[in-house]
Amino acid sequence: MQPDTHALIVIDVQNDFCPGGSLAVPEGDQIVAGINALMSDFSAVVFTQDWHPAHHLSFASQHADKDPYEVVDMPYGPQVLWPDHCVQGSQGAAFHTDLNITAADMIIRKGFRPAIDSYSAFFENDQTTPTGLEGYLRTRGISEVTLVGLATDFCVHFSAVDSARLGFATTVRLDLCRAIDLDGSLTAAREAMTAAGVHLT
């Protein structure tokens, strides 16, 4: 059992990111059993949940003459345009059926502001607007976090870098993550996490 100062953060294990979903991560469902087993080692468990309005500006469908995976400039920086996914209240936004959701102490919903995307569990993509997770962890006395989930090269990556930047000792269990790997994004993510001081195991 991990000490009470150590939290597990489970990133976006939702239907749309698993096989059959609108933004499926290859083998995304294959990490669920391992995550369920790992949760019993932690007294603090937090889930994140992508939670977009139907007209979210990160959706390619909201941009004329743009296709999914094109990159556009937003006021907060470059933004990959995604297929519509994790729309609020939809089956795609629900957690994977086999995920033990009763183990979660808290669920952080992100990406609900229509004009800005949110990869990180800690901040919107402007790197300024907080989700509230940092405050929750600090008030619980958490100083170390382990991250698992989807996808390694986007939401896990940005969450891990922000966690380390905020001063939490941060580990990513790569065996319990899966990646999209869009144009070399997995290699770039691993390099960025390592450079930020994240422990990859």
Image (cartoon, rainbow, N blue to C red):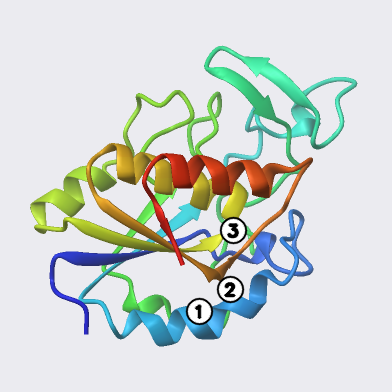
Query: Residue 79 appears in which quarter of the rendering?
Result: top right
**Which residue is situated farthest in the right direction here?**
65
In the image, taking residue 3 as reference, residue 51 lies left or right, namely right
Instruction: Tell me if mark 2 has few (under 14), some (14-19) or many (20+) residues whose alpha carbon lies within 10 angstroms of its own.
Output: many
Residue at the disc numbered 1:
99
Residue drawn at (65%, 79%) of the image:
30
Locate residue 159, reporting x and y percent.
Answer: 43, 46
Which amino acid, by three-letter code, is at mark 1? Leu
In the image, taking residue 64 as reference, residue 40 lies left or right, namely left
Residue drawn at (82%, 37%) of the image:
68
In the rendered structure, find residue 123 and report the number of the disc placed on it: none
Taking 166 as reference, is 106 above or below it?
A: below
Whole-angstrom CA distance, mark 2 to mark 3, is 9 Å
Residue drawn at (58%, 44%) of the image:
189
| Pointers 3 and 1 in contact (C-beta within 8 Å) | no
Taking 94 as reference, is 121 above or below it?
A: above
- Give the secondary structure at mark 1: loop
Which of the two residues, 151 or 66, is positioned nearer the viewer here? 151
- Give the secondary structure at mark 2: loop
Residue at the disc numbered 3:
93
| Pointers 2 and 1 in contact (C-beta within 8 Å) | yes
Of discs 3 and 1, which sits in the foreground?
Answer: 1
- Give the secondary structure at mark 3: loop
